Image (tube, helix red, strand yellow):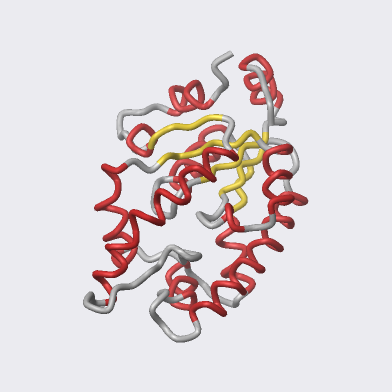
Amino acid sequence: MKLSAKQFLKQHEDKTLKLAFVGMSNIGKSFTARRFAGHFDYDLIEVDKLIWERLGHDTMEEFADWQGHPYEDGYAERESLSIEMETHATIKAIEDSNGATILDTTGSVIYVDPALRRRIKEEFYVIHIKAEMSDLERLKWDYFDNPKPLIWGNQYRPKADLTDRENIFECYPRLLMSRAKEYANMADVTVTSKFVLNPNLTEDELLLALKPSR
């Protein structure tokens, strides 16, 4: 959504601003979305939650266990089904948004239909929380230690001489780089994970950092 800084702040004050957060899993999207929504009284719609509730799961961990890893039997079928469910959940989230709303997208939003991605960009002011190479080590370990469902697409290309975990660590940088451009193409503004996760950052500073530069 193309907005000037003045329009952004006016819609924020009028409680009509719609924001969407995009970026890698475990990069800080949900943390930032919940913080912003709680402080400024926005409705928060978490697409991941809509999906795992549809599956009959109670937690994100159960959703991640269902999704599984790319080296497991049946993963490709579950990956395809996950994208299909994400498409329906995202459409529902958009249609349910009314007034001041934050759409917390999944990391795999870039794999849904291009027309749906355009709709997000047209109806929401899109914020990309960027993963930098300095985040890579943490993200790789979080894949196992803080599991969230992750779509690999064609970026998981295992080597026969590596273990399953080693192949995940080997392929993760490729996944990160392949997604970065797509997130950036959707975004109206980009901020780094280091910025949004700074414990000294205030909500008002966050708001000003998210607004357009002009």
Residue 198 coordinates in the image, percent (x, y) = 32, 34
- Identify the residue at horizontal 37%, vertical 39% (top origin): 193
* Residue that extends furthest to the bottom in the rendered view of this protein: 73
Q: Quarter-wise, where is residue 90 in the image?
A: bottom right
> On the picture, is 107 further left or further right than 186?
left
Which image quadrant for residue 82? bottom right
Q: Residue 117, relative to residue 208: is it above or below?
A: below
* Above or below for 185 versus 117: above
With respect to residue 32, does 142 lie above or below?
Answer: below
Q: Is residue 64 left or right of residue 79?
A: left
At horizontal 65% and vertical 40% (from top left) the residue drawn is: 101
State which quarter of the image contains the N terminus: top right
Tally the marks. Answer: 0
Q: Nearer the viewer, residue 25 or 40?
A: 25
Give the residue at x 48% y 69%: 59
The residue closer to the viewer here, 180 or 93, is: 180
The spot of residue 20 in percent (x, y) is 60, 41
**Quadrant holding the C terminus:** top right
Name the image quarter holding residue 3.
top right
Q: Position of residue 213 (x, y in %)?
A: 54, 16
Question: Residue 185 or 199: which is nearer the viewer?
Answer: 185
- Location of residue 110 with respect to 98 vertically, above or below: below
Q: Residue at x 60, y 72 (%)?
A: 80
Q: Where is residue 124? Give x, y as percent.
A: 67, 37
Of the pair 74 and 160, the residue shown nearer to us: 160
Q: Is residue 48 left or right of residue 121?
A: left
